[in-house]
Amino acid sequence: MSIVRHFISGSESAEAVRTGQVFDPATGAVAREVAFASTAEAETAIAAAKAALPAWRSSSLIKRADVFFRLRQILAERTSELAAIVTSEHGKVLSDAAGEVSRGIENVEFAAGLVHLLKGERAEQVSRGVDVHSVKQPVGVVAAITPFNFPVMVPLWMVASAIACGNTVVLKPSEKDPSAAIWLAKAFQEAGLPDGVLNVVQGDKVAVDALLDSKDVAAVSFVGSTPIARSIYERASANGKRVQALGGAKNHMVVMPDADIDGAVAAAISAAYGSAGERCMAVSVLVAVGDIADDLVAGIRDRIATLQIGPGTDAASEMGPLITREHRDKVASYVTGAAAEGATVVVDGTQKTFAGDGFFIGVSLVDHVKPGMKVYEDEIFGPVLSVVRVETYAEAVELINANAFGNGTAIFTRDGGTARQFEFDIEVGMVGVNVPIPVPVGAFSFGGWKSSLFGDSHIYGPESIHFYTRSKVVTTRWPDHTPSQVDLGFPSNH
Ligand code: NAD
């Protein structure tokens, strides 16, 4: 059986002492194994990144930008090849996997503009004959730790900007779908990235802890579930590193009585069940305001009856399997538990049967959900849409602002004033107005509030340049041939 290995200093490592299994979620079979790094192996990757740092941070910006232009070309031309790798290990349908690659390309395009992004500031004559300018310099070795649900896009959220800023990187992808990271590292190499600038260590907590505890890692970018994000933030920041740790979500989509109901139904279905709900920006709670709830629920119920669920490689499939058998069973437990909690299970996806041993589950729609129920409180990360009925806009806002998570939200309305007020009121990091999944385009940054993000930097876009650089401010005076004098007072510029 083949083994997905580490990629250190430009080549795949030979040893694999500890290994884990990688499944094909569509069949349930073990497709390959993945190496699990020991502490020593992770330290070898960190040492490789450290050794590559002086040359990379000294490389010309134009040369660096060239790598990203070439990488963009490789990703665009070979999207289907990479999408097939994603589908084989993650399970999502091929078109969705290709969509993930194209959203990742946005981060590469952003990074290609690094000459512009790394410009500092300058002020002339802050005092007589004295000028000040600032520069942005790399932080050093960056650790990038990523989740299973976007094995291409989320690594690119981190590594594109980190490398553009002159840092070197150790990427620790999810052990559940590790192959895409190796493909990406090789694509970077083909695009001209020097060996050691991007290294990949495969594995679990052992590899992650080695990254968090190493004195040679300066910054940590993490995306994953909230409990792990919180622990990563605490451990890495206690070790003196800068950290951004993005966590889980419970995204609410508010539908006002004046909304286009048909459009809202289609948007809710797409955002709740796309990628089997395994998106951190998936809509998991539909908040129906006023007397439209029955129409919304009936519309969704009728239209999801014909959704095609099957292998991601089948062109007819609209939704693939979940990532693991255990996760599938956990998702099912929320649906079966919802009725006991007093909710109404309108469509029970757990009752749908599938041939074979793939990790499939049908889509579920649960009505009359209320705060306090497990189906409402937990991030389910599966194809389960809850409907909460409220009477007023104010109740909808109160519900969302009381929720522990604050990743994404959306409002569907025809009223600009309501939409504007929602934007003002809502305590969530990313807001859609008649857009159900408001993932910012690559020129903006992505990040939630509250338990959806630990740290103060959002990811990719302009905030990533801030996160992956240290600013240095230089105050300059050149001899002006006037007689020099000693002054023990604190420098003031008046
Ligand atoms: P996860 O937290 O289980 O794993 C994320 C990463 O952490 C993986 O690389 C994993 O190997 C590692 N890890 C797991 N347990 C660890 C531990 N105890 N110590 C150290 N490292 C550990 O997340 P997942 O199941 O792979 O991904 C799904 C989660 O990610 C969901 O909660 C989803 O909302 C979240 N997510 C958030 C965003 C966002 O931008 N906020 C984006 C994508 C996914």
Image (cartoon, rainbow, N blue to C red):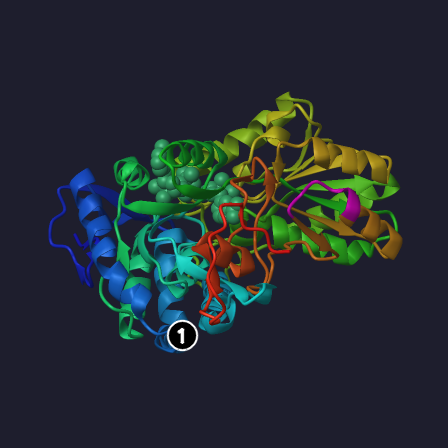
Q: Position of residue 173 (x, y in %)?
A: 34, 50
Q: Nearer the viewer, residue 27 or 37?
A: 37
**Magenta extent:** 424-429
Q: Establish if 53 lies above or below 458.
A: below
Between 103 and 54, which is closer to the camera in this rendering?
Answer: 54
Tag 1's secondary structure? helix
Q: Is residue 167 left or right of residue 302?
A: left
- Image-quadrant location for residue 153: bottom left
The residue that disc 1 covers is: 65
Asked if residue 113 lies left or right of residue 358, the reply is: right
- Please identify the quarter of the rendering in which residue 73 is found: bottom left
Q: Position of residue 158 (x, y in %)?
A: 43, 56
Give ligand 1's quarter of the image.
top left
- Give percent across and percent down for residue 452: 56, 39
Please, what is the dominant secondary structure of the magenta stretch?
loop
Residue type pointed to by label 1:
Ala
Q: Which residue is found at the position 49% from the left and 46% from the top?
A: 488
In this rendering, is residue 220 above or below 162? above
Of 70 and 481, the residue lying toward us: 481
Asked if one can make out residue 394 in the rendered structure from this viewpoint, the answer is yes
